[in-house]
């Protein structure tokens, strides 16, 4: 006899088999409009978190590629001929306007999904005007680092599922199901952050690259960014301002990131008697995936901010 659980599992398997059949029948037809992925829709993700999300939601139905190679600072991306061709052939480009000016200029809005349009954005950092002349986000008025809030990324996942379903109606249910499952995983991560950061000795997050505005907003932390641009040298006045704040708030840790020059954070840490730790803004592929890297960030934050069990 089958229990209710295994019965629904069996039904799920049958549904999966039906989908596989549909895929086989659909193969070779021109309906998806792109030959690059063997008939699958070609999804071009601008940089890592969007690649991860596209792979989760696209699953076996989409051919996902990424414009920003691992280890490349995405804000500085320049597009070569190969990448321009990739964009030209894409069924859907997944990007966030304001992260990469080169991508913003190159996308065809008719075949692109700007994740910033799916969520409520936050204004750019309050010293944005200072960094704006050379900063990466001079073209938009909002902070583009929205992927660092799992709850917002869950919303993006659902919208991406809808866009892929519309682009590839034969596999619409698969996209929607995987989008829902991805949103659920992100919801679990969101709960872990909320619980893990409930009670902390300090809520000030001093960071070299001001990428954690959404994370801070979601979990009631106060981000103090030294600079918006990971490559820029902060002014002595800004450094002195942050040093004073770090001392006042008894900050023990200055956060840096793997891709940026850690020198500025180290200078500041030495001055206020703090140590440095790496908080990953996930702008490039981590050693694990989005979920494991974010859990690593949570562990780092709990230690640095002195959060209780
Ligand atoms: Zn950034």
Image: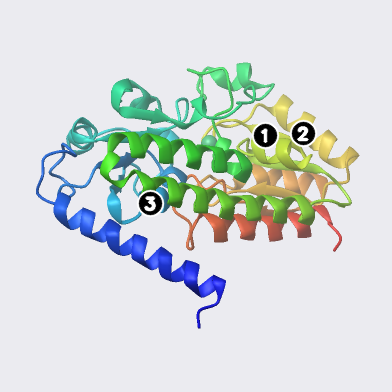
Task: Name the spot of residue 298 as percent of width and height, x first.
Answer: 69, 56
- Image mark for residue 242: 2
Cα gap from disc 1 to disc 3, whole angstroms: 33 Å
Q: Residue at x 29, y 41 (%)?
A: 43
How many numbered tags mark residues here? 3
Question: Which of the pair 147/175 is nearer the observer?
Answer: 175
- Rendering quarter of residue 299: bottom right
> Along the polypeptide, which appears first: circle 1 or circle 2?
1
Q: Is residue 154 visible?
A: yes
Task: Name the spot of residue 169 as percent of width and height, x first.
Answer: 29, 39
Q: Is residue 237 left or right of residue 244?
A: left
Question: Which of the pair 224/37 is nearer the observer?
Answer: 37
- Image mark for residue 55: 3
> Along the polypeptide, which appears first: circle 2 or circle 3?
3
When the figure is inspected, residue 228 is found, relative to residue 147, above or below; the finding is above
When the figure is inspected, residue 144 is found, relative to residue 277, above or below; the finding is above
Q: Residue at x 88, y 46 (%)?
A: 250
Q: Is residue 278 visible?
A: no
Cα gap from disc 2 to disc 3, whole angstroms: 39 Å
Q: Residue at x 35, y 65 (%)?
A: 14
Q: Tag 1's secondary structure?
A: strand
Task: Indicate the quadrant containing the C terminus: top left, top right, bottom left or bottom right.
Answer: bottom right
Mark 1 vs 2: CB contact within 8 A: yes
- Disc nearest the viewer among 2 and 3: 3
Residues packed near mark 3 inside 10 Å, few (<14), some (14 to 19) or many (20 plus): some
When the figure is inspected, residue 138 is found, relative to residue 186, above or below; the finding is above
The residue indicated by pointer 1 is 226
Q: Residue furthest bottom?
A: 1
Q: Tag 2's secondary structure?
A: helix
Task: Name the spot of residue 266 as percent of width and height, x first.
Answer: 67, 48
């Amino acid at each position: 006899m089958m229990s209710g659980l295994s019965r629904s599992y069996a039904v799920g398997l049958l549904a999966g088999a039906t989908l596989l059949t549909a895929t086989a029948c659909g193969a070779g037809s021109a309906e998806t409009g792109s030959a690059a992925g063997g008939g699958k829709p070609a999804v071009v993700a601008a940089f890592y978190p969007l690649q991860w999300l596209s792979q989760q939601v696209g699953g076996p139905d989409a051919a996902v590629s990424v414009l920003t190679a691992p280890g490349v600072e995405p804000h500085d991306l320049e597009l070569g001929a190969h990448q321009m061709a990739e964009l030209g052939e894409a069924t859907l480009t997944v990007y966030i306007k304001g992260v990469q000016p080169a991508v913003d200029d190159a996308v065809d809005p008719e075949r692109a999904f700007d994740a910033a349009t799916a969520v409520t954005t936050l204004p750019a950092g309050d010293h944005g005007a200072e960094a704006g002349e050379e900063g990466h986000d001079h073209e938009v008025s909002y902070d583009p680092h929205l992927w660092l809030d799992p709850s917002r990324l869950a919303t993006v996942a659902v919208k991406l599922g809808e866009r892929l379903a519309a682009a590839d109606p034969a596999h619409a249910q698969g996209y929607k199901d995987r989008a829902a499952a991805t949103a659920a995983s992100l919801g679990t991560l969101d709960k872990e952050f909320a619980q893990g950061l409930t009670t902390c000795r300090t809520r000030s997050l001093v960071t070299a690259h001001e990428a954690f505005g959404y994370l801070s907003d979601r979990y009631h932390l106060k981000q103090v960014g030294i600079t918006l641009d990971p490559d820029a040298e902060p002014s002595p006045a800004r450094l002195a301002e942050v040093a004073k704040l770090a001392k006042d708030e008894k900050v023990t840790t200055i956060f840096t990131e793997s891709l940026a020059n850690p020198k500025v954070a180290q200078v500041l840490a030495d001055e206020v008697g703090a140590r440095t730790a790496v908080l990953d803004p996930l702008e490039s592929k981590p050693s694990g995936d989005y979920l494991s890297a974010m859990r690593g960030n949570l562990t780092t934050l709990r230690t640095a901010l002195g959060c209780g069990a």
